[in-house]
Image: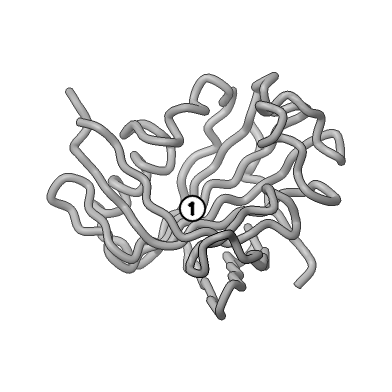
Amino acid sequence: MASPQWKISGDYFEACSCDSVCPCPTSGLAARPTQGYCDAGLVFHVERGSYGSTPLDGLSFAVLLHTPGAMIAGNWTVGLIVDERATADQREALTAIGSGQGGGPMAAVGPLVGTFAGVEAKPIRIERSDMRRSVSIAGMLDIAVEGIPGASPTGRHSAGGCRRAAGLRGEARAPGGRKSPSVQSPR
């Protein structure tokens, strides 16, 4: 059965365990992470969105991942944290989007995932101030990032998925083990 059409727009930011600008995005995921492994948190806050007829406005989710070496080598462990305020249908929708099962950007990394560590519903606290973003998910994730201005006065630019990664505004669309790793960065 085909996945429902979905669309989300809102805030996205990420951070990983690299010491400086992450080498992965600019190397086609082939570069070795600066620590030799990668622990990352990819955070999504949906300002507006739906999965089929299920509204997702105001909800958040986070993808937590661990790679034992260069990302392109695969064997990722991935876990998903969904907003505890979500209904059962909304949790199912966020899981489909965040895991890639519903298509879209996360589906592209599906072949690299060796272990799916599961889904947990938890409180997700996101704070925003200008180009700063932070997230706290008790016992799982605690990161803070700051964007840098892009060429457009209203745009943002990513410094790469590192401890000092940038917050992005964006939109994602889709057509038709190990415990989840935790990531911590200095504030």
Coordinates of residue 76 in the picture (x, y in percent): 63, 29
- 172 above or below 128? above
132 with respect to 121 (left or right): right
- Give neighbour class at mark 1: few <14, some 14-19, many 20+ (Cα, 10 Å): many
Position of the N terminus by quadrant: top left
31 with respect to 165 (left or right): right
In the image, what residue type sits under mark 1? Answer: Ile
Residue at the image point whose x is 58% and y is 23% from the top: 112
Coordinates of residue 79 in the picture (x, y in percent): 54, 42
Protein image colouring: one colour
Coordinates of residue 84 in the picture (x, y in percent): 39, 64
| Residue 48 in view (yes/no) | yes
129 with respect to 108 (left or right): right
Position of the C terminus by quadrant: bottom right
46 with respect to 162 (left or right): left
In the image, 43 versus 132, the foreground residue is 132
Query: Which SS class for mark 1?
Result: strand
| Residue 121 in view (yes/no) | no
Which residue is most to the left?
53
User: Which quadrant of the structure image shows residue 57?
Assistant: bottom left
- 108 above or below 63? above
User: Which quadrant of the structure image shows residue 52?
Assistant: top left
In the image, 1 versus 148, the foreground residue is 148
Residue at the image point whose x is 52% and y is 19% from the top: 111
Coordinates of residue 133 in the picture (x, y in percent): 59, 70
Q: How many marks?
A: 1
The residue indicated by pointer 1 is 81
Residue at the image point whose x is 76% and y is 29% from the top: 68
In the image, 54 versus 13, the foreground residue is 13
